[in-house]
Image: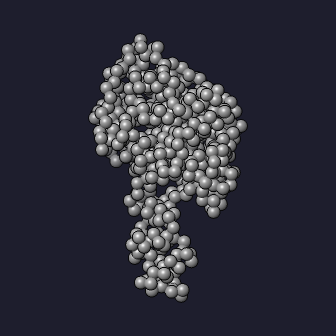
């Protein structure tokens, strides 16, 4: 694969930065962001099994707040009160005190200059890839279709009187080609990738009922976010999760919530309507969704442009644009591991690295974002559009704003590498910026649900930790190998 070079950067002087659009204010719904700099949601795996705000969570967001971005978005936070590993949750009132402490930490560390949003999401069940033995003995629902096809394989010696245990044992000995003649495509997927619920599984009551259930869950979560003091809520309609699946062309539900564009956007609009009705106009509410799913048979930019127009028409306060990141084309996981939606072509488009095959990883989603924004403007709406994807220097960010490709610039990996990079640029200290090398080291840790860090931090491993008293040791990850916060600037 090619190895794209990190482009040379020209950093602005302090005087130039003062007149730059990047550092100018912008109205986003109920709030005004002091700068058009945005740190999007990243899951750092610093919560606990209860989904609570921990000291490590406070340290993480406090460190980003030190850099005073215009907007900081808290990681994808689950709206259901169910076990989901060390992922933040907002599905019960007991989470409000911790979230309130998080808001206070960011306000204090940014000296009130950063607006804090929280991204809220729903996700469906996914299980680890099973062994063949476990799948055939425990998970496969054996029916007459399977029995008939197995009986047709005369070498197996199965008859109508054979016990189910004999049929299951026979399945274990079949080749992949033979299995393809017995199992459905969905059953083969469950065997080879692990079981995963889809929004089209209408035979499951809890899937059929999603349109009745989700607006209330999102609405209640938004109310808790308001109670905790957040400035805004970002509805997670992107990537491999429930709401993105409703927007997808692959959603062919036949209950009025799938098929055509109008049917696919119906539930996302109903979720937004419920949220807005509960929190009122004083809480900024927007969404993050995809410009292109990338997957075969998935939505494209023309779908996204339609969704954007409908969202803006309905009154969303911002539109944050991402790309790819789907389960549909994910790499086959190892036995005992779950599929990860950033391992296939759509995942590589979501977080393009220097090793991406074609084109540049820098500003890769800008063309599609520009098309989406143009559709919104042509419809007469001034809704701010947030662009993301490979921003790592001043000229790329400023030109995107100046040309009208977007209204706000979001940078995840570069902000992870150096949370102070926006502040350094604004102060005319661009030469001091620690620049992301786009190898996706951080994404590899996320895939394993390990505490996310940056490989560049450990080059300065012995530098003082800005979050600890003078003379204290550097805070390390649970395996002791990596520092948990960036070195001080």
Q: Is residue 21 above or below residue 324?
A: above
Q: Quadrant of the N terminus?
A: top left
How is the model colour-coded? one colour
Judge left or right: residue 483 versus residue 50: left
Q: Is 188 in front, or is 35?
A: 188
Residue at horizontal 47%, vertical 77%?
A: 168
Name the quadrant containing residue 282. Answer: top right
Residue at horizontal 36%, vertical 40%?
A: 358
**Taking the image as drawn, is residue 392 in sight?**
yes
Residue at horizontal 69%, vertical 41%?
A: 274
Judge left or right: residue 310 versus residue 412: right
Position of residue 450 measured from the top left corner of the image (x, y, whole percent): 40, 47
Name the quadrant containing residue 25. Answer: top right
Judge left or right: residue 1 versus residue 36: left
Q: Residue furthest right?
A: 277
Q: Is residue 121 above or below residue 305?
A: below
Judge left or right: residue 414 versus residue 186: left
Q: Quadrant of the C terminus?
A: top left
Residue at horizontal 36%, vertical 28%?
A: 488
Q: Is 22 in front, or is 115?
A: 22
Numbered circles on residues, count: 0
Position of residue 452 measured from the top left corner of the image (x, y, whole percent): 40, 42
**Taking the image as drawn, is residue 465 in sight?**
no
Q: Is 459 in front, or is 166?
A: 166
């Amino acid at each position: 694969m090619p190895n794209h070079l990190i482009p040379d950067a020209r950093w602005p002087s302090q005087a130039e930065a003062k007149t730059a659009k990047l550092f100018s204010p912008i109205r986003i719904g109920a709030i005004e962001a002091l700068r058009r700099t945005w740190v999007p949601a990243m899951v750092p795996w610093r919560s606990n099994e209860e989904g609570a705000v921990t000291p490590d969570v406070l340290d993480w967001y406090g460190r980003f707040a030190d850099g005073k971005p215009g907007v900081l978005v808290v990681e994808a936070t689950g709206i259901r009160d169910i076990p989901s590993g060390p992922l933040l949750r907002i599905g019960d009132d007991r989470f409000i005190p911790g979230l309130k402490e998080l808001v206070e930490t960011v306000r204090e560390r940014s000296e009130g200059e950063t607006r804090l949003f929280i991204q809220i999401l729903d996700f469906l069940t996914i299980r680890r890839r099973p062994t063949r033995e476990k799948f055939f003995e425990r998970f496969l629902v054996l029916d007459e279709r399977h029995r008939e096809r197995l009986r047709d394989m005369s070498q197996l010696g199965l008859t109508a009187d054979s016990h189910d245990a004999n049929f299951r044992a026979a399945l274990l000995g079949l080749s992949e080609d033979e299995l393809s003649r017995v199992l459905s495509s969905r059953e083969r997927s469950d065997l080879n990738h692990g079981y995963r619920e889809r929004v089209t599984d209408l035979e499951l009551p809890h899937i059929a009922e999603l349109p009745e259930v989700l607006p209330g869950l999102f609405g209640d979560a938004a109310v808790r976010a308001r109670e905790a003091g957040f400035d805004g809520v970002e509805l997670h309609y992107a990537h491999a999760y429930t709401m993105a699946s409703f927007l997808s062309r692959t959603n062919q539900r036949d209950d009025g919530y799938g098929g055509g564009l109008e049917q696919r956007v119906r539930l996302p609009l109903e979720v937004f309507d419920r949220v807005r009705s509960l929190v009122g106009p004083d809480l900024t509410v927007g969404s993050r969704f995809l410009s292109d799913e990338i997957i075969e048979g998935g939505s494209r930019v023309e779908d996204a442009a339609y969704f954007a127009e409908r969202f803006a028409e309905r009154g969303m306060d911002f539109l944050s644009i991402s790309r790819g990141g789907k389960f549909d084309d994910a790499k086959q996981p190892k036995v005992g591991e779950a599929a990860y939606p950033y391992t296939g072509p759509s995942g590589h488009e979501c977080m393009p690295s220097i090793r991406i095959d074609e084109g540049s990883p820098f500003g890769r989603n800008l063309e599609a974002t520009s098309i989406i924004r143009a559709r919104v403007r042509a419809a007469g709406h001034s809704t701010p559009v947030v662009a993301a994807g490979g921003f790592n220097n001043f000229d790329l960010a400023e030109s995107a704003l100046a040309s009208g490709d977007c209204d706000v610039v979001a940078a995840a990996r570069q902000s992870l590498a150096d949370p102070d990079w926006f502040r350094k640029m604004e102060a005319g200290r661009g030469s001091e910026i620690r620049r992301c090398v786009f190898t996706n080291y951080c994404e590899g840790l996320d895939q394993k649900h390990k505490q996310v860090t940056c490989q560049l931090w450990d080059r300065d491993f012995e530098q003082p930790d800005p979050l600890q008293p003078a003379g204290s040791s550097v805070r390390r990850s649970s395996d002791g190998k990596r520092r948990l916060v960036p070195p001080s600037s």
